Amino acid sequence: MPWTLISTRNETVRIARGGWLDALRFIVAFLIILHHFQAAGPVPLAQLVNPIFERGGFLLTNFFLIDSGYVLMRVYGAAVNQRRMSPTDFFLKRFLRVTPAHLIMGLSLVALVVVGTAVGFAPRNPEWFRWDQLPAQLLLLQSYGVHGGLGWNAPTWSISALIGCYLCFPWIIRGLMRLGPWAALAAGVGVYLAANQLCWSLLGYPVYQMPMGYGFIRALPLFFLGMCLAWFAQKVWIAPRLAGWAGVLAAVGFFALELHDKHALIALTLISVIILAAGAVPVKRPSKLVETAAMVSFSMFITNEVVRIAWFGVVNAASAKLALSTPIQWGLWVLGVMAAVGFAFAFHFAIDNPLQTRIRAWLKRRSGGRATTPTLQPVVSIDG
């Protein structure tokens, strides 16, 4: 491969909305919905189609965590490093981005369970709605060894873990930006491999299988890897055509690989290539549709489990009472997936976006009118 296709002399591509990074956010969010819904059909998709629908969940989470580190580094890295945004402002901005929607959906699920039980529709699996598990989850403490967090809106463990990553972000930048791009890339890979080996040695399983109760330990190496990929992408120009082909081949290879078995480290490499490639392709014609879909991806992530619980609570009761045929049950399953996407769009435009507009205005007033967001209209990660 000619080295002219990779250079430190050319100006690298700026991150922008409406391109492949945004498209990836929506695709991953939709695949997360399929993963959470796959076992709710008449036959789990993992049995009916391929085990990838079940085992792919941890890979989607890996993608989500790496992408979060990558995008936040590219959008906020320079501002935080140059003290144009303080560590407190950065953390407050990120914390207030994720917690309001989390609390709204968490409390909505509590109301759903309480009201449903009161009218005679108690959960079929009450072990997933134990009250002693709820406080840690609502307070987003479940990824730090605090008792609780199982059941309820369980996927929020990754939001909990990311809050710790937000705290570490400004301090990681201080060391990371002293490294050259290739050294940073080696550091990201090396830290993840070291964390993985340490977990194998001490616990007997890889870092990606870290229990949700210690999710921060799982998340931080992946978040750091994403930051290292971003620093590399900001310093090393990759020919757009090379990036495009690399991204397509990595995506095809990723799905082909996972259809046959779980290859975590190889999959992680391919995910990294996909993210790097997406960020290296210029957004010449931004798509408003892609941008809008990407903006809704956080709502898709935070709401889909609650929608699943509510939807299939009704569907399962109807199936038992009316003896619905298998084709009708599959039809209701498809409608459930569509309802999860539709609810996410409604939640984003009716609740989350208006709320965030007010929060951004408050943050601006708090900072004395100084911009707390870079002038670049950013692409943001699934966590918002």
Image: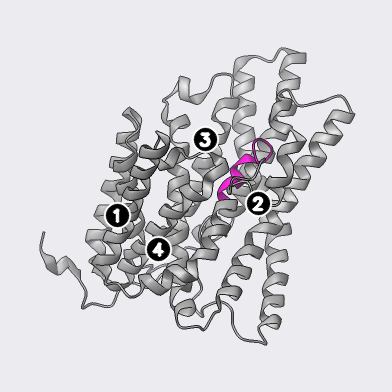
Relative image position of residue 12 (x, y in whole percent) = 30, 73
- Which amino acid type corresponds to the residue marked 4 in the rendered image? Met
Q: Nearer the viewer, mark 2 or mark 4?
A: 2
At label 3, counting other C-alpha atoms closer than 10 Å, the crowd grade (few under 14, some 14-19, many 20 or more) is many
Amino acid on which the number 1 mark rests in the picture: Gly
Residue found at the far top of this picture:
323
Which of pointers 4 and 1 lies earlier in the amino acid sequence? 1
Q: Where is residue 156 shown, x and y percent of the image?
A: 61, 46
Q: Mark 1 sits on what residue?
A: 190
User: Between 322 and 364, which is closer to the camera in this rendering?
Assistant: 364
Mark 4 → mark 1, Cα distance in angstroms: 13 Å
Q: CA distance from mark 2 to mark 3?
A: 22 Å
Q: Is residue 291 above or below residue 37?
A: below
Residue 315 on the magenta span:
no
- SS assignment at label 2: loop
> 207 or 203: nearer the eye?
203
Task: Give the mark nearest the N terminus, 2 or 3.
Answer: 3
What is the magenta range? Answer: 149-158
Pick whichever of labels 3 and 4 is earlier in the sequence: 3
Please give the residue where the numbered disc 3 appears in the rendered image.
35
As measured in the structure, the alpha-carbon distance from the residue carrying label 2 to the one carrying label 4 is 23 Å
Q: Amino acid at mark 2?
A: Leu
